[in-house]
Image: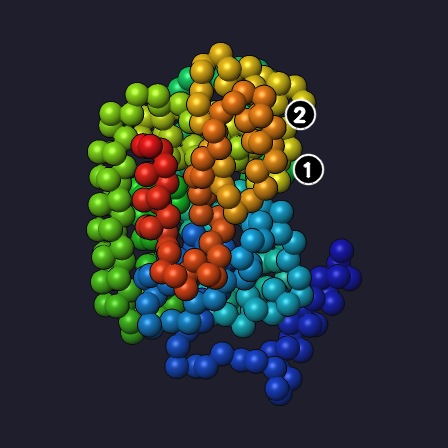
Amino acid sequence: MKLFKKFILFVVAFALIVPGVSVHAQDKKTVMTTFYPVYYLASRIGGEAVNVEMLLESGQDAHSYESTAKDAVAVQEADLFIYQDDEMEFFVSDLLSIVDQEATQVLESTEGIELLSGDHNHEEEEHEEGHEEEHDHEHDHEHEEGHSHEFDPHTWLDPNFYSQQAENVKNALIELDPANEATYTENAAKLSEELTALNEDFIVGLADLKNRTIVVQHEAFGYLAHAYDLEQLAISGLANNAEPSAKQLAEMTNVVNERNIQVIYVDPTTSTTISETVSQATGAELRPLRTLEFITEEEIEQGEDYFSIMRENLAQLTK
């Protein structure tokens, strides 16, 4: 492992000094982000004052992604690197161990924010109603083998939490580039207003929802459920690639039947095979509900963004 890190450091240094290797223009700061939720924050707040890039390509899973030497070069070339959370992008800790953080400013976007608890035992909880207890966010915790989640990282699905992240991004950009403080402050204020309006739309839209239990494939909607008095029942875990056991599938099938649940929500940008199994066994309809971990280039070109997809989520929940 040490030899590998030395090799990566050599690659990074070589890429930064050899003529012909791409270096970013100096008139604008470069911000490297990991995946869409943090990319969107940096883009909205940075505006035209910064160059914002995204490390992961569309469809790549931030949970299971493994960084490369090319990633280390890209991060080291950037002036600021922003990622969601140690609970989301497990690859970041290894990546940052070989990046000179005196040369590249680093922001964990959920820094200082109290997060909801993460992985829990499906067999013991028996899908009890209620919301997960909030816990202090500790940034020095270690992950057990298998990437268990001490905290739920999907904060952006609650506009209130996302607004707190936006404040962190604004402050990091001001620290990086104080000459454009007015731009970052104005852009962040506008974004905050839009997030407040989105939150109000969800409060009003979900107020009279009779069945407040949502069955989802990917356990990504804890913050949404917590914010709007919903109960989330998940077939699989917090990671997109989590595979439920046969026992968990059988238990969820029983729950869907016993509660007469008519809908199972799935993210159409990921595999829906697990939910299809439960759907076939229960007759429940599959309906889209986006986690926003992925957004395609085609969607971006068509003008889709965080707000349009979140409002489509609201429409699906209130059908």
First in residue order: circle 1 vs circle 2: 1
Eyeballing the image, is 21 above or below 31?
Answer: below
Can residue 153 be seen at all in this image of the molecule?
Answer: no
Q: Which disc number belongs to residue 245?
A: 2
The answer to which of 97 and 25 lies nearer the viewer is: 25
Q: Position of residue 103 (x, y in %)?
A: 51, 70
Which residue is at the front of the view, 126 or 139?
126
Q: Nearer the viewer, residue 151 or 195?
A: 195
Disc 1 marks which amino acid?
Glu
- The reply, left or right, for residue 260 in relation to residue 277 is left
Does residue 162 lie above or below 232 as drawn?
below
Residue 291 located left or right of residue 70 = left
Residue 107 point in image, percent of width and height: 45, 56
Depth check, front residue: 40 or 208: 208
What residue sits right under mark 1 in the picture? 145
Kindly indicate the quadrant of the structure image that contains residue 311: top left
Which quarter shows the N terminus?
bottom right
Residue at 49% from the left image edge and 32% from the top image edge: 286
Tell whether label 2 touches label 1 (CB within 8 Å).
no
Relative to residue 178, is residue 60 depicted above or below? Answer: above
Point out the frontmost of discs 1 and 2. Answer: 2
* Secondary structure under the numbered disc 1 in the rendered image: loop
Q: Badge 1: few (under 14), some or many (20 or more) residues near its Cα, within 10 Å?
A: few
Quarter where residue 120 is shown: top right
Q: Residue at 29% across / 74% down in the picture?
A: 179
Question: Residue 253 at what x, y percent from top left?
Answer: 56, 19
Q: Is residue 272 something one can see in this rendering?
A: yes
